[in-house]
Image: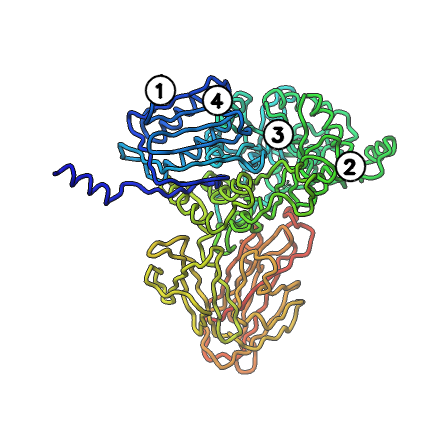
Amino acid sequence: MICVLGALLLACSQEYTKEVKIIPRPLELIENDQVFTLDKHTNVVFETDNEAVVKVKTFFLRELSRLVERTVQQGKEVRDNNQIKILFNDSLDIESYILKVTEKNIVIESSSYGGVIYALQSLKQLILVNNVSIKSKVYIPGVSIKDSPAFAWRGFMLDVVRHMQSVDELKKVLDYMADLKLNVFHMHLSDDQGFRMEIESYPLLNEIGSWRVDYNTSDENINAYWGRPEQQEGEKATYGGYYTKKQLKELIQYAAERNIQILPEIDVPGHARAIIASYPELSCSQSKTYVATGWSRLNNTLCPSNEACYELMDSLIAEVAEVFPMPYIHIGGDECYRHYWEEHAQCQDFMRINNLKDARNLQSYFIHRMEEIVSANGKEMIGWDEILDGGLAPNATVMSWRGEEGGIKAAQMNHDVIMSPASYHYFDFKQGQSSYEPNLGYAQSLLSKVYAYQVIPEALNKDQEKYILGTQANLWTESISDWSKLTYMVFPRLYALAENAWTHNENKNWDDFINRLKFHLDLMDQKGIRHAKSVFNPWLHHEGNGKEIKVWFTSEITDPVIRYTLDGSLPNGQSAIFTDTLRLHKTTDLQAAIFDGDKLLGQVIQEHFIVHKAAGSEVRLIKGDTESDIQSITDLCYGELLQAGDEHWVQMNTDCLIEITLNKPQDINKVMIHSLRHTLHGLYGIARFEVFAEMNGQFKKVGDTGKIGENYMQGRNIMQNSIECELKEVRKIQVKLYKVDPIPEKHAAGGKESYMKIDEIVVL
Ligand code: ACM
């Protein structure tokens, strides 16, 4: 009786879910109503002696055991049930697999090492839907999967130069990639800010080239990479390092176990400042230089008319080829500043002698020489799409990053292509509304945008399509100074990349992806992996008209339930649901978030909307130069951080004096101004401001910030400065704004004229 009752209770409480949440979505997936129960008697049997398949044994058993938190043994013989059977099936394409889960057994079929690895990854995701911890039995939902990747190249690039990651961190990256069936890990090993591979033939590449003066910052609000000071004589270069060949070989082995190949990139002839700092004779100027501390174009280009460059490349590429078994070597080729060559007599002579029409042809000459070197080492060359400039080398593969055009052009010329257009697949871009994201990126690539990417460009015909090997995403690490920032920028976009690369286009579905993704993000929460929830944040829009602020929300997900509060309290599952535009007539603390029932899906977005005393007041520009509508500085429209084309910012090109006539006499306690900084381009915060109030027909100075030191620094963010005052019954004020003048010589925009952008003069 007790037994029967126990069984009934078990059946009713249902210990497991049968939901299947695999990412990337398999080609064919049929769920059945059975469940396989993995327990201490379950074992794994290899019903084949095919070498490729059997090679997976150790890794398979170790991974499965780790996941189910007990040792799963290899079975000695085939039996009828409670077994995971691995079979060789030579009718399946490379990397394809079949995975069948029934009540009795689990059967995996493949023709390759990779096929078994991918079956294991799908099996792991099936196992994870029933949280395995603390359970003596693991329930695996019944399915029949037949799966095959859409593209052979499924890559992820990590910039290990701008910030360097430890070998253990790189192994974690490889684990994440393996989970999602990605198979090429592209390491960007050299750039202006460091050289990251041990090279024996040219040891200064490591002694000098691997180190820079440390201006790293962990601050997620100030993004100053693009304006760091250059290293000075006598300063010590303390940040950096390089991967030894032993470490790289260990990584390559670790990756290979997971069916991932590692693609090395040595970026030349531009982005070569670390090489030039090590061997200054290789640049046109031949002058001493330092490894760049941050963004820089200074003296960072090799001199193609100097044979010594090719001698170094010969040795360097030979060492790279010896360490990395992948059949390709990436030689960069991007963003090369050719003016160094245009101004160099030796390069000009070289071009004449070699019949090279212009500097583009000289670049192409250099890339052709690189291809010869790469090819002499038994490898094929890949380069960024700039290698098309001046004529493509005969066997080059093109990695298209400046949009799709380079990839389209190369495929039309019958060259292999990897599509990696920045606007979709650059993970250093922000993945949500700028003001509510950590200030780590400089443009936007939302999850929905990444997911919408179609790898095969429409411009290609059927014959040309075959040159598209696949796709990859890239994480440039200028602002990624630690692991938590890295995982934040990568997740969840890596899931979308994986589905673009693996899942056939007709099987992609945004709503279904989001539904599966929620489960994976919950797992990440459980493991404490920082990731963006931005796709589940409401997008907050507003428009002021000087009287009120209209506020509305949109969302990347379909039919979100957006709840909000206007009283400073945190929204919860009972808060008001947003249906129509809100109208704010007074200063309001707005908070909003997307909910699934009571569950908060993303973050709570908070905004302090100020309806201030000068709202809608008449504005007059007494002195100064602006092309914007000056009246809009009292219209209650506030600017967003680095939002391209945000017209809420009023641009001031000179110092200026602005007069505001309040609609009625007011008591004033404070005048506050936000200014936008993007100092790389000369946009600085306000250098100083003064406030004057009209008293008895005369304007009298009532406040002065003095020189605002922090606004003379470099960065990309919004600054807020204010003046406190105590004024009664004021009708008119004047605000005098001073711009940064001159821009400090050593700044990125040194020598240029600065300008300012403010959104509103807030009078409180
Ligand atoms: C690149 O982003 N310069 C390849």
Q: Position of residue 68 (x, y in %)?
A: 33, 31
- Residue at (47% x, 43% y) in the render: 491
Q: Which residue is mark 3?
A: 209
Q: Earlier in the sequence, mark 3 or mark 1?
A: 1
Which badge, 2 or 1, is on the more N-terminal residue? 1
The answer to whether the beta carbon of the residue marked 3 is less than 8 Å from any atom of ligand 1 is no
Viewer-closest of 379 and 429: 379
Q: Amino acid at mark 4?
A: Val
151 relative to 580 in the view: left or right? right
Label 2 or label 3, whichever lies nearer to me, is 2
Q: Which residue is mark 1?
A: 75
The reply to whether residue 74 is in sight is: no
**According to the image, label 2 marks what residue?**
391
Q: Secondary structure at mark 2?
A: loop
**Closer to the N terminus: mark 4 or mark 2?**
4
Compared across the picture, whether 438 is left or right of 10 comes to right
Q: Amino acid at mark 1?
A: Gly
Q: Position of residue 690 (x, y in %)?
A: 55, 67
Q: Measure the alpha-carbon separation of dots 3 and 1.
A: 53 Å
